[in-house]
Image (tube, rainbow, N blue to C red):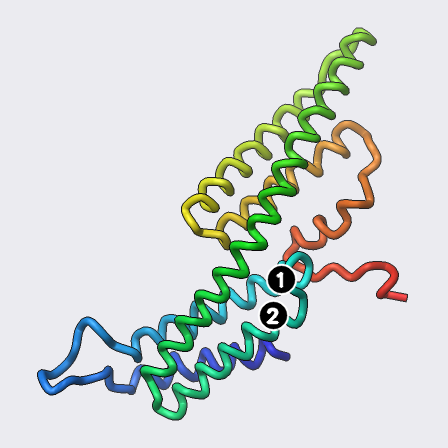
Amino acid sequence: MRSLLIFIIAINIVSSSAFAQPARTGKGLNPLYKPISVVQRLSYDNFKFIKLLRASIINYGGGEAEFDRLVDTYAEASALYFQNRLKESASLFTKNLNEIMGVAQQIAQKYRDDTSKLHVDIIKMNVKYNVKLAIDGKKSNSASESVISGASFGLRKANDFFDRSRPIKAMIYYRRAKKSCFRLYKILGLAFPRKFEKDVVDNRNQVFVSKKKKK
């Protein structure tokens, strides 16, 4: 319901701002400061980011309370726009964006730590498996090397985005890297650990619901 609400707000702002006039000074248009442009851009971007981050926030962040806080700030900034308080609206939308990026950075750090550990663990697992095959006189599975290579690429890409302060983009690649890592269990014919159930659901950008909560 909240996602639908902010979607409606975003659409209304973008469409109505097409007819709004940018801030003026005594010397005419001020090209350096146009609150309406800030509002128009961030009403769209912030909505997109909030929607994209919902599952991650609930799974690994501050939960529903943190998600609701971001939505509430977004809604307040939208209300200021419709009251024609453009400077205040632009300021609050900017604050909202900073809060969103702050939350995303924290979750991306969690993704980075988890994915890096998982990556090391599956490499060790694959090496041990291949050593056992060699002892038994069997050939190693080339598919496992391909999966590890894909996971390594995804992790490097994610770390690059993370280091350049692009946490949301980094999270996408951390998820891809984890997905590649998880494939190794099936390739090697090993049981998939239950501790990764939340990660699998989160990789689909869905909220994880434990079996205890389902009952």
The residue sitting at 28% across, 86% down in the picture is 20
Where residue 110 appears, x then y in whole percent? 61, 49
User: Amino acid type of disc 2?
Assistant: Phe
**In the picture, residue 60 is in which quadrant?**
bottom right
Q: Is residue 76 above or below residue 56?
A: below
Most extreme residue toward the left is 27
113, 81: nearer the viewer: 113
Numbered label tally? 2
| Residue placed under numbered mark 1 in the picture | 57
Label 2 element class? helix
Q: Is residue 169 above or below residue 137?
A: below
Query: Disc 1 or 2, which lies upstream in sequence?
Result: 1
The residue sitting at 36% across, 83% down in the picture is 88
Q: Which mark is residue 81?
A: none
Label 1 element class? helix
**In the picture, residue 29 is in which quadrant?**
bottom left
The alpha-carbon separation of the residues under discs 1 and 2 comes to 6 Å
The residue sitting at 39% across, 71% down in the picture is 94
Where residue 112 appears, x then y in whole percent? 58, 43
Where residue 197 appears, x then y in whole percent? 77, 49
Circle 2 packing at 10 Å, graded few (<14), some (14-19), many (20+), is many
Q: Do residues under tags 1 and 2 come within 8 Å of each other at their CB atoms?
A: yes
| Residue placed under numbered mark 2 in the picture | 67
**In the picture, residue 38 is in which quadrant?**
bottom left
10, 96: nearer the viewer: 96
Query: What quarter of the picture does the N terminus occupy?
Result: bottom right
The residue sitting at 77% across, 34% down in the picture is 186
User: Amino acid type of disc 1?
Assistant: Ile
